[in-house]
Image: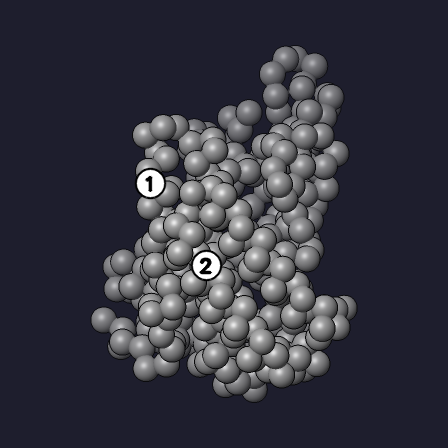
Amino acid sequence: MLGSEGMCEVIETHMSWVFLTERHAFKLKKPVSLPFVDYRTVERRRQSCENELRLGRRLAASVYEAVVPLVASPAGGLAVGGAGEVTDWLVVMRRLPEDRMLPQMLVRGAATREHADALGDVLAGFYDGAPRAGWSAAEYQHRLREQVLTVGGELVARGAPPVTVGGIVRAALVATRLEGPALDARVDGGHVLDAHGDLRPEHVCLESPPVVIDPLEFDDDLRTLDAASELAFFALECDRLEASWFAARVLARYAEASGDRLPEPLLALYRRQHALTRALIALRHVDDAEPAAQPRWRAKAESYLACVAPAAVTPTAAPPSPP
């Protein structure tokens, strides 16, 4: 299929296959039907590819190149573009240097304060230009509460410890009530917006300037977040990599560049919500994982819950210094 670019490596994710050549990454959506997405038709997969291209260019314009058809050529076999029947669609991306991806940079001790500052500047500019949510403050709070309750219920149904989940859910609901005026101010101040939706370290490449790939393209509502919520998620994921210093520096630079001071109680609330969601995503992977891999996904879910069990939630201030 990609013979013109030589040998390729194949990576499988929950929703895609990614074919890596020396210069490019070709993403092919799986024909899956999940609770949050339906990719069973070629047209739906084409629309998803187009959405990813549009959204991906916001934070990685130099990476997202095109959407191209995968065709059954008259000579037989499959080809990228050209004459023939369109069988599917591909997102074409420039292949990023693996050694510049944030997790690898953190492991090597190569990530610096300057890298964190550069990412904070990029995010400040991105959020400043992002479309604002059309929700009222009351609707936003209702959505937050419903999400916590729904995710918590499914976690318990999938075997997560009820006592642990219940404690986290109650803490989140109490915080939502106590921080109601602050949440209203986030909406009224235009901080709830069309965000990236999946701001994890593995999606960050520390080029100059940094780029962020793989936006959440399949659901506009899920991608609509408070900037503070998305940054709290990034901090949670950095904490799991034992790199809380990097996230703290990014958040501080974002606040400096944007003038948006991030309230610690809201960061803790959002951290709980994202940990619940990531735990649920891990347990959903059990459905289609090989038996040998299922304990790994359950352990991952447990680790997210452990991060935000009421006694475990600590402020993000005063992080350890970088190595």
Q: Image height check: is 243 above or below 71?
A: below
**Residue 106 location, x and y as percent?**
31, 61
Q: Which mark is residue 211?
A: none
Image vertical order of residue 124 relative to residue 1, above or below: below
Depth-wise, is mark 2 or mark 1 nearer the camera?
A: 2
Against 54, is 133 above or below? below
| Mark 1 surroundings: few (<14), some (14-19) or many (≥20) residues within 10 A | some
Q: Is residue 230 left or right of residue 240?
A: right
236 horizontally vs 26: left or right = left
Task: State which tag comes first along the sequence, 2 or 1.
Answer: 2
Q: Is residue 200 left or right of residue 215?
A: left
Q: Quadrant of residue 289?
A: top left
- For the point 56% across and 73% down, the residue is 176
Q: Quadrant of residue 242?
A: bottom left
Residue in view at x 37 percent, y 35 percent? 294
Indicate the position of residue 185 as horizontal and vertical percent values.
65, 83
User: Is residue 307 visible in this depiction of the protein?
Assistant: yes
Provide the secondary structure element on which disc 2 rests. helix
The single residue placed furthest to the front in the displayed view is 163
Element class at badge 1: helix
Residue 303 point in image, percent of width and height = 34, 54
The answer to whether 179 appears left or right of 156 in the picture is right
Indicate which disc residue 296 carries: 1
Residue visible at 58% across and 53% down? 150
Depth order, front residue of 163/301: 163
Q: Which residue is mark 2?
A: 166
Q: Position of residue 280 (x, y in %)?
A: 48, 48
Q: Quadrant of the N terminus?
A: top right
Residue at horizontal 46 percent and vertical 80 percent from the top:
264
